Image (cartoon, rainbow, N blue to C red):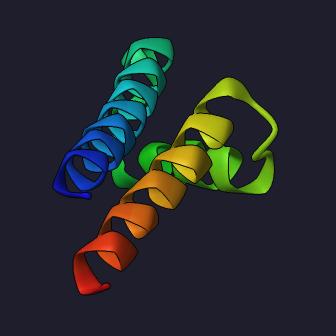
Amino acid sequence: MILLLVISFLIGVYLIGSAILLVLRETKNKRNSFWDFLVIVLDVISDPITSEGMRIFFGGVFIAIAILLLVI
């Protein structure tokens, strides 16, 4: 049970981390001000079917599973 908790947490952290790195890599030249950063974040939120959106979604799901396994 503990092994499943650790594996699901690590997968979730990996997915969220890789999504953040993908967003930062794609928008390297667009991060000049706060408003540019806000537009990038809103773009990922408004179009969750992109690779980054799906990684963030499933990363959150795996972390939620790990938290539920920790509580049980």
Quarter residue 40 falls in: top right
> Does the rendering let one see residue 40?
yes
**Residue at position x 36%, y 36% from top?**
11
Say if residue 39 shows up in the picture.
no
Quarter of the image that includes the N terminus: bottom left
Q: Nearer the viewer, residue 68 or 44?
A: 68
How many dots with numbers? 0
Q: Residue furthest bottom?
A: 71
59 or 17: which is nearer to us?
Answer: 59
In the picture shown, does residue 7 fall above or below 39?
above
In the image, 68 versus 31, the foreground residue is: 68
Question: The C terminus lies in which quarter of the figure?
Answer: bottom left
Could you say which quadrant of the image residue 54 lies in? top right
Taking the spot 38% from the left edge, 44% from the top edge, the residue there is 12
Q: Is residue 31 above or below residue 58?
A: above
Q: Position of residue 69 (x, y in %)?
A: 33, 71
Q: Position of residue 34 (x, y in %)?
A: 36, 53
Q: For the point 75% across and 30% down, which residue is it?
A: 50
Q: Nearer the viewer, residue 20 or 70?
A: 70
Coordinates of residue 48 in the picture (x, y in percent): 75, 46
